Amino acid sequence: MPVDVELGVFASAVEVTLTTNLNLKLASSEDRQVIAGIFEVLEPLKSGWGVPWEGVAVTDLRLNFFGPDGKPLGNVGLSPTLVTAHTLGGFAQREVSPDVAQRCLQLIGYETSDSGTGGSV
């Protein structure tokens, strides 16, 4: 079932952290250029979102976005072939090419393997 995902909420983020799905912090940035770069990668993913009958996948890595008040704005899960989003109380996922995860991880400064996913995405 197709769903709309509003990624624009992440544009107001002042901090983004990369964590495991168990919330272990791997990297973090408050640099506006880094946050804008990640948003630039994610923003074009406006369509193609859905909720599979078995539920949204749990990815190994997650980008968590925080607003000026320190409160969470939502998160985006990263894997080599899909991204997940938790925004405004909803969950969804969509397929992507591997370069989406690679670019986001590079922007936040997370070292990746030759596959571009650190072997754990």
Image: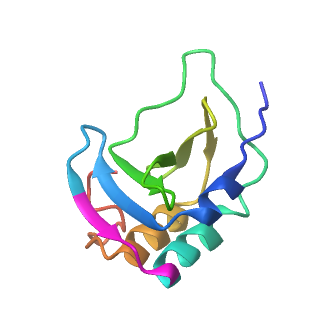
Which is nearer the eye, 92 or 115?
Answer: 92
Q: Quadrant of residue 50?
A: top right
Q: Is residue 31 magenta?
A: yes
Structure colour scheme: rainbow
The location of residue 14, given as percent across then percent down, is 48, 68
Q: Write the residue at 57% across / 42% down.
A: 85
The location of residue 115, given as percent across then percent down, is 35, 66
Position of the N terminus, as image quadrant, is top right
Position of 31 relative to 15 (above/below) = below
Residue 50 lies left or right of residue 31; in this view the side is right
The location of residue 83, given as percent across then percent down, is 54, 47
Q: Write the residue at 35% across / 61% down.
A: 117
Q: Is residue 43 magenta?
A: no
Furthest toward the front, the residue is 69
Provide the residue span drawn in magenta.
26-32
Furthest toward the bottom, the residue is 33
Position of 6 relative to 8 (above/below) = above
Position of 4 relative to 46 (above/below) = above
Residue 33 lies left or right of residue 105; in this view the side is right
Which is nearer the eye, 79 or 115?
Answer: 79
Residue 75 lies left or right of residue 111; in this view the side is right
Q: Write the residue at 52% across / 50% down.
A: 81
- Count up the numbered dots: 0
The location of residue 12, given as percent across then percent down, is 61, 64
Q: Write the residue at 77% across / 53% down.
A: 46
